[in-house]
Image (cartoon, rainbow, N blue to C red):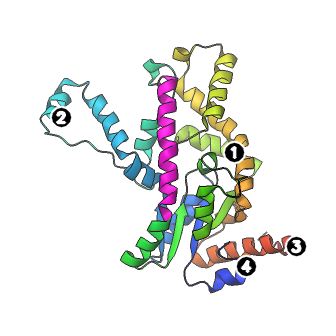
Amino acid sequence: MIYPKAADWQAAGQKQVLLFGMSGLGKTHLSSLLRGTGRWFHYSVDYRIGTRYMGEYIADNFKREAMKNPFLRELLMTDSVYIASNITFDNLAPLSTYLGKPGNPALGGLAFAEYLVRQEQHRQAEIAAMLDTTRFIARAREIYGYDSFICDTSGSICEVVDPWNPEDPVLTELSRHHLMVWIKGSEAHTAELVRRFDRAPKPMYYQPDFLTRMWQEYRMRQGEQPEQVNPDAFVRWTYAQALAHRQPRYAAMAEWGVTVTAEEVAQVRDTAGFDDLIARALDRKSDPRLDRRPA
């Protein structure tokens, strides 16, 4: 790790951290808090995916829909209107909409084969966006004068790496330049995460084997043909299954760095609190007897 002990972290003039874990446990909360101090550069992997690597796919999808409308079609054909997504750190709806959901086309569903194509596009984009962090660390420092860097990863990072492979190229590169920090949720968080996803689904990538298995199992349970599947019901059900599927993958990734809990993250109010959070995690890593979590 780039900060082997708490003292190394506290003394570091340049701090580089990568947060990972399920969406909804505090990655973006911490990143936004640090960005707000004016001393940390906030790199959002989801934002990078949606703008740099999948922006054209997203815009083309909008255009396909607009071409179905005679009024908009004429404007598009004469270059009279400009269509683009407006992705922000806090609003990833254009990316979620493009990735879509498989099932009944009358309910907005995609053919499962097309859904898998878009999932693969996302996998490639996510890997590229994560590997871009090395360049952005230097860019943030050289152009904007930021000494500290926080990488806010996608919840699906564990799906595109092999955390049990000590030579995984993505994790090797990321751990070389960041302290990897797992925000670990508890069983008590599961229902709340599912409720949040129900209300505001986020972009999700699943490994094709897992996704195909879920698709088959869901249809068998419901006794439905592909064109009968309710897209919303399927993605909600699959997300709930993914919580258990991803937990051991996150745990293996944590061996590349340190672990903090979602409860600890919820108590962080400022940079001093964040520094203490990481220092405690490093203490626990070096000696589990030094578990000084706040009550």
Q: Secondary structure at mark 2?
A: helix
- Report crowding for label 3: few under 14, some 14 to 19, many 20 or more residues within 10 A (C-alpha): few
Left or right relative to 8: residue 116: left
Residue 5's tag is 4
Distance (Cα) linking label 4 and label 2: 58 Å
In the image, is residue 111 part of the stretch drawn in magenta? yes
Q: Give the residue displayed 69% in from the left and 36% down from the top.
A: 241
Residue 246's tag is 1
User: Residue type at mark 3?
Assistant: Arg
User: Residue type at mark 1?
Assistant: Arg
Q: Are marks 2 and 1 in contact (CB under 8 Å)?
A: no
Distance (Cα) linking label 4 and label 3: 14 Å
Residue 236's tag is none
Furthest residue to the front? 167
Determine which residue is flagged by label 2: 76
Distance (Cα) linking label 3 and label 2: 65 Å
- Report crowding for label 2: few under 14, some 14 to 19, many 20 or more residues within 10 A (C-alpha): some
Q: Are marks 4 and 2 in contact (CB under 8 Å)?
A: no
**What's the magenta region?**
110-133
